[in-house]
Image: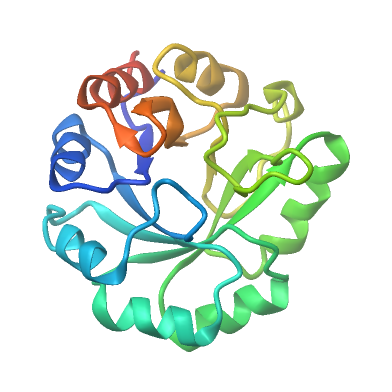
Amino acid sequence: MPPDIRAKICGLRTAADVAAAANAGAAYVGFVFFAKSPRHLDIDTAAALAAEVPLGVCKVALTVNATDAELDAIVARVPLDMLQLHGKETPERVAEIKARFGLPVMKAIGIADAEDLSLIDRYEPVADQLLIDAKPPRNAELPGGNGLAFDWRLLAGRKYWQKPWMLAGGLTPDNVAEAIRMTSARQVDVSSGVESAPGVKDADRIAGFLSAAHQP
């Protein structure tokens, strides 16, 4: 695995989380704005944490079917570099948000089987990046962060897309190297896979994840 793998540590909630991610070499950090998630932040806390992020590390806000008013409130207070849309936003909604806020937009796409891959082609023209995640179980409370992986063989040997994309879903320090090998992903995202309990990040697991992702 080449050392140019870029990793996102998502769902950070404390200054110690931010430091652990930055010190381990994360290229992105993610802050969650979704009340049902154990990783949810209020805007004041997120603003304070974003101020702790070193220059050069991309600050991402994860939202789920957020309204313009909700996004206005987040963007007005939190210094962000990217918006991650993790709900059922249509391609048209993705384009609206990108135009309104002038920030790069990453659209999460849930994958369970080969038929779901067609969604990638629908969203690629309007998103700046794609997050290829495991589709949540039916009736799941959370659209992501469930610790579930999809069959990585679905991506093996495929003609890849023109936009940057990130692999997510069930990644851990123990399997990220294999996931990268199977999919040829150049970017990976982790949340629950580096936690000791829901919403509680573990600095050692963060370091282990980044180390495994960068193994030659």
Residue 174 lies in quadrant: top left
Quadrant showing the N terminus = top left
Residue 121 shown left or right of residue 169 in the figure: right
Q: Is 135 in front, or is 201? A: 201
**Which residue is pictured at 76% across the width and 28% down the height?**
154
Residue 124 horizontal/vertical position (percent):
66, 60
Quadrant showing the C terminus = top left
Residue 21 lies in quadrant: top left
* Vertical position of residue 131 compared to residue 204: above or below: below
Residue 211 lies in quadrant: top left
* Vertical position of residue 14 compared to residue 74: above or below: above
**Which residue is pictured at 69% across the width and 41% down the height?**
136
Residue 3 shown left or right of residue 92 in the figure: left
**Which residue is pictured at 54% across the width and 80% down the height?**
97
Residue 42 horizontal/vertical position (percent):
31, 66
Q: Is 55 in front, or is 170? A: 170
**Which residue is pictured at 63% across the width and 27% down the height?**
149
Residue 67 horizontal/vertical position (percent):
56, 81
* Vertical position of residue 39 compared to residue 128: above or below: above
Residue 9 horizontal/vertical position (percent):
34, 40
